[in-house]
Image (tube, rainbow, N blue to C red):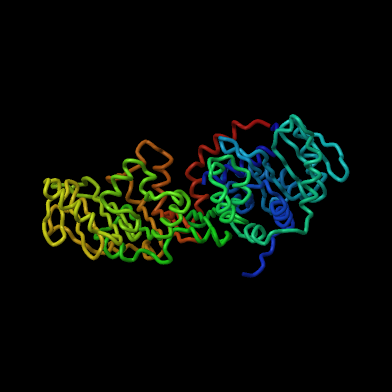
């Protein structure tokens, strides 16, 4: 094969796609990359891939006909590279219009230097000694290694030789200076970790944010200062778990986070009845959100926030009031469930919506009165109003709408029907649930014509998201809770993978 390293990296990516104590680094390479990120003002993203964990979970080596081929290739690579160490990476800004970084780095640990060099030479890469480094480069790529570490850089080197960059990179890797937040992020245990360095991302960006006033830009500087968001992806037995963590950010960043501290329990009590195919609850801190947006975009005007949305915004303002908090208290919910037609068969999906009302409801009631007089809305009494789409009940400073209700007698306000996998639903300020096992063939089937989605949904039980201001957790839960999700996907594509082996030439 022309390039076994390319094959190895592509394989690692394929596996991924188909499918206050002081923190300590998990390996020497992990610590070195923490030093590299900490001492750079250009790194906008960094992280690692735990290749060994993903390889084991995918179980490719256990597949007849394919397993021996995979084992042979990995044995060759492991002769030179220590794959038991995570493969680390870093990306430098600015990003171009397609989101491609100006430079990308891959860092790998060495198992045996001589075996590694032999592997490179078999691929046609011949290295020259530069001080204590073995170096190879062309116009777009540079590779160097010493006794313990390989650094692979992709960059446009058409005008500059990369030797100085390589030597400087290795020097930084040895630095004792490390930021606590970077070390803490890289010490997380996961199959895949991708972190964003918010301060560097903003400083190297070429977006419209640069057109803001000096005061506004200074405020953004404070918000992103030494801020690190990180995303993790884990292939577990029976589920795929993704997490977005925002705990390693500045106090100014935390001051503009928009979720309430607690979940929207009032939504849960009133969004039913029925077992949902889809359900969502949201508890927004409306006043904090409005204060931030007003300060950022309207601090020098007397206009309301709705003026940002043009004519439509002005229309909303005239109907409901000057502020977001006039409309809603931030508690919002929605659910879809299968409907029934007059024959008892599946019909149009039924939708329930909950909206907690804000501080001023006079404008809303005046608007309803106008629509009632026009005949667009029918006042059924006791707070019930009939629309073309269904019936709404205004009660206890909230609006509950049900598309399937045809009369006051058929309008039932109740909690969601209890489902075992939804026992924690609504505990966090943001919750979402999708009943994947019942989506196929339902009124809201979104898999039609997409074979991969149909396969994934056939394997799946449900999908959920739960989040607060510090962390958002998404889970794809499969029907088979005892087998790793990667292994289940690989099993589904086993025959296709076997066929591909015959198309690979060496």
Quadrant of the rendered structure where residue 128 is? top right
Q: Is residue 361 left or right of residue 491?
A: left
Q: Quadrant of residue 410?
A: bottom left
Image coordinates for residue 454, horizontal then vertical, percent = 39, 42
| Residue at the bottom extreme, as displayed | 21
Q: Nearer the viewer, residue 340 or 285?
A: 285
Q: Residue at x 28, y 62 (%)?
A: 417
Q: Which percent across, then down, holds residue 175?
A: 78, 55
Query: Which quadrant of the figure contains the C terminus?
Result: top right
Residue at point 61%, 55% (across, down): 225
Q: From the viewer's perspective, is 499 left or right of 126? A: left
Residue under the image location 72 percent in, 52 percent down: 39
Q: Quadrant of the N terminus?
A: top right
Residue 249 figure quarter: bottom right
Which residue of the protein is positioned furthest toward the right in this rendering? 131
Number of numbered discs visible in the structure rendering: 0
Measured as percent of width and height from the top left, residue 405 is found at: 17, 53
Q: Nearer the viewer, residue 17 or 218?
A: 218
Residue 383: image location, x then y, percent: 16, 60
């Amino acid at each position: 094969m022309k390039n076994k390293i390319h094959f190895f990296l592509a394989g690692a990516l394929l596996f991924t796609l188909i499918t206050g104590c002081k923190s300590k680094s998990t390996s020497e390479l992990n610590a070195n990359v923490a030093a590299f990120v900490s001492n750079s003002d250009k790194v906008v993203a960094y992280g690692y891939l735990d290749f060994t964990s993903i390889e084991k979970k995918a179980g490719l080596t256990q597949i007849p006909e394919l397993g021996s081929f995979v084992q042979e290739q990995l044995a060759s690579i492991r002769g030179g590279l220590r794959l038991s160490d995570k493969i680390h990476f870093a990306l430098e800004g600015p990003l171009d219009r397609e989101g491609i970084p100006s430079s990308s780095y891959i860092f790998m640990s060495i198992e045996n230097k001589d075996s590694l060099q032999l592997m490179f030479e078999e691929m046609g890469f011949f290295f020259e000694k530069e001080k204590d480094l073995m170096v190879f480069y062309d116009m777009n790529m540079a590779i160097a290694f010493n006794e313990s570490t390989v650094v692979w850089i992709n960059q446009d080197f058409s005008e500059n030789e990369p030797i100085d960059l390589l030597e400087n990179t290795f020097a930084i890797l040895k630095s004792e200076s490390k930021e606590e937040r970077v070390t803490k992020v890289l010490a997380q245990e996961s199959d895949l970790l991708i972190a964003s360095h918010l301060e560097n991302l903003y400083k190297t960006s070429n977006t419209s944010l640069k057109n803001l006033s000096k005061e506004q830009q200074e405020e953004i500087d404070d918000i992103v200062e030494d801020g690190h968001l990180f995303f993790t992806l884990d292939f577990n037995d029976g589920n795929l778990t993704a997490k977005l963590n925002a705990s390693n950010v500045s106090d100014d960043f935390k001051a503009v986070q928009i979720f309430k501290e607690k979940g929207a329990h009032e939504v849960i009590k009133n969004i039913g009845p029925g077992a949902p195919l889809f359900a969502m609850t949201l508890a927004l801190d409306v006043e904090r959100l409005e204060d931030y947006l007003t300060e950022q975009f309207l601090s020098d005007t007397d206009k309301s926030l709705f003026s940002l949305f043009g004519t439509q915004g002005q229309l909303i303002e005239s109907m409901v009031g000057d502020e977001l908090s006039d409309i809603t208290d931030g508690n919002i919910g929605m659910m879809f469930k299968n409907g029934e037609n007059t024959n008892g068969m599946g019909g149009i999906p039924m939708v329930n919506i909950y909206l907690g009302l804000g501080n001023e409801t006079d404008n809303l009631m005046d608007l309803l009165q106008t629509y009632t007089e026009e005949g667009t809305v029918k006042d059924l009494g006791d707070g019930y109003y009939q629309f073309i789409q269904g019936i709404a009940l205004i009660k206890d400073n909230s609006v509950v709408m049900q598309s399937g209700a045809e009369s006051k007698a058929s309008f039932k306000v109740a909690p969601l029907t209890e489902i075992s996998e939804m026992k924690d639903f609504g505990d966090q300020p943001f919750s979402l649930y999708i009943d994947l096992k019942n989506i196929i063939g339902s009124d809201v089937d979104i898999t039609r014509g997409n074979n991969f989605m149909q396969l994934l949904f056939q394997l799946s039980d449900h999908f959920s998201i739960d989040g607060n201001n510090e962390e958002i957790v998404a889970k794809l839960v499969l029907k088979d809770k005892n087998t790793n999700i990667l292994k289940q996907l690989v099993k589904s594509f086993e025959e296709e993978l076997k066929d591909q082996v015959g198309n690979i030439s060496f």
